[in-house]
Image (cartoon, rainbow, N blue to C red):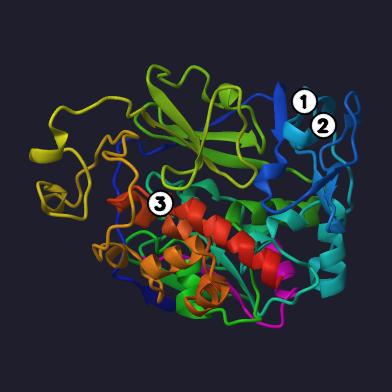
Amino acid sequence: MSKDIRIKKGLDIKLVGDAAQITTELPLGGVFAIQPDDFHGVIPKILAKEGTEVKAGQALFYSKSDERILFPSPVSGKISEIVRGARRKVLAIKITADAQQQYKDFGKKDVDAMSGEEVRNHLFASGCWPFVKQRPYDVVANPNQAPKSIFVSAYASAPLAADYDYALKGKEAELQTALTALTKLTAGKVHVSVAKSSTSSPFKGMKGVELHNVSGPHPVGNVSTQISQIDPINKGEVVWVVTPQDLVVIGELLLTGKFNAKRTIALAGSKFSKPQYVSAIAGVNIGALTKGNLEADNARVISGNVLSGLQVNEEGFLGYYENIVTAIPEGNDYEFFGWNKPVFNKVSTSRAFTFSWLNPKKKYDLNTNTNGEHRAFVVTGSYEEVFPLDIYPMQLLKACKYQDLDEMEGLGAYEIAPEDFALTEFICVSKQPHQKIIREGLDLMREELG
């Protein structure tokens, strides 16, 4: 039986460039990369060397904190380069892919007959464990802690986000297998959230999980919003989170024995001449992904969505957890007297000189201009209008800034992730880097409190 969740606080930012529901297949070959920074907090211990031939699913490195957590190659081929930065930090492991993929065989599994320990060990051995992330701290899950429940958000509400109903069409068997496996990893429930308006979600017929219908403005699709509504986290508790596209990889692994990191990626934004979907493998080169489709003149390309993604160039690579690449105009222009004239072409929660509230369904072609400069926090009360969690966002940001761990605990830092502060950052008149402040605060809590 499904349950309804509706939030009222938030903000839908409607942008030009939704991906059309057409999928093209990206040819194999070229260079792929795994970037250890995608796995926040993980210190890598390299297993493979330059020149080594690897199969898809073969481990490239493991976490120094737990040798069981392996990070596999998404493709088969030759390791062409290990890119290092300051103090020999590993920035990327590049693999030149074979034209014909070779997969490491992990063996087919009957998930119904597996115990929780067997599922856990299989995820370790196959390199699928990094797909399981945890709250608190929004990092790869600590396998030594038992989660009280597991969450899957099958509705992405961020601007221009990929439509899971379309991207996961036909993957019902893989999703059901992966969800059955997850139910064995917790004594609690596996919660799956879908859009209330969805009529074709592949999750609607899933067994063994608790289904929730969510509605309301962004960030209703953020898993933190759903956790706060369904099963809030208290001190000492842990919940795990898995994304739908990663469930498909886990499910296919159990059904076929292959680690296949292929996913359907949305190319969205006004700077794509044909916004649409592309079928490609995780870690794909951005240049190959956008070739012939990107209007490169004055464009910013983002791995992820416009609110929480990272800027990349054509030599960069798709983030390990991402299923969208966004391209929007670069905001490097200066608007003469822009601070004191009526604004019709921008989104704002304020009604001072702005009129987006008159046309809530209008789509905008926004650029990256922040329309202001960094300054001290200005108390306006506007953060609370777009922040649906039962948390005081301004106070929590300040607690992170002055590093008061007791106050951060008391204000609910256990159930948040940096992406939850993307909207407050978007509307911030002080131009403060909210997501960076929260990330540093969570890192401090993890270091000091464990």
- Vertically, is 390 above or below 418? below
From mark 2 to mark 3, how far is it between C-alphas?
33 Å
Indicate which disc residue 158 carries: 3
From the viewer's perspective, is residue 237 above or below residue 173? below
Badge 1 is on which residue?
Answer: 97
Look at the picture and state if 443 lies above or below 260: below
| Badge nearest the viewer, 2 or 3 | 3
Is disc 1 placed on a helix, strand or loop? Answer: strand
**Which three-letter amino acid code belongs to the residue tagged 2?**
Ser
Amino acid found under the numbered disc labelled 1 = Ala
Q: Are marks 1 and 2 in contact (CB under 8 Å)?
A: yes
- Disc 1 or 2, which lies upstream in sequence? 2
Does 89 sit left or right of 204 as displayed?
Answer: right
Q: Which residues are magenta?
A: 177-196
Residue drawn at (52%, 72%), measured in percent from left and top?
408
Residue at image location 38% in from the left, 50% down from the top: 432
Residue 391 in the image: x percent, y percent? Answer: 41, 74
Question: Measured from the top left, where is residue 396 in percent x and y?
Answer: 44, 68
Do labels 2 and 3 touch, CB within 8 Å?
no
Q: Which mark is residue 76?
A: 2
Q: Which dot, 1 or 3, sits closer to the camera? A: 3
Indicate the position of residue 306 as horizontal and vertical percent values: 42, 42
Amino acid type shown at disc 3: Ala
Left-right relation of 44 to 316: right
Q: Determine the secondary structure under disc 3.
A: loop
**How many other residues sit within 10 Å of disc 3, few (<14), some (14-19) or many (≥20)?**
many
Question: Do we see residue 257 in this rendering?
Answer: no
Neighbours of disc 2 within 10 Å: few (<14), some (14-19), many (20+): many
Kindly report the distance in space between the C-alpha atoms of the residues bearing marks 1 and 2.
Answer: 6 Å
Give how far across and how far down residue 299 sits, in percent: 40, 24
Give 113 or 260, whichever is nearer the viewer: 260
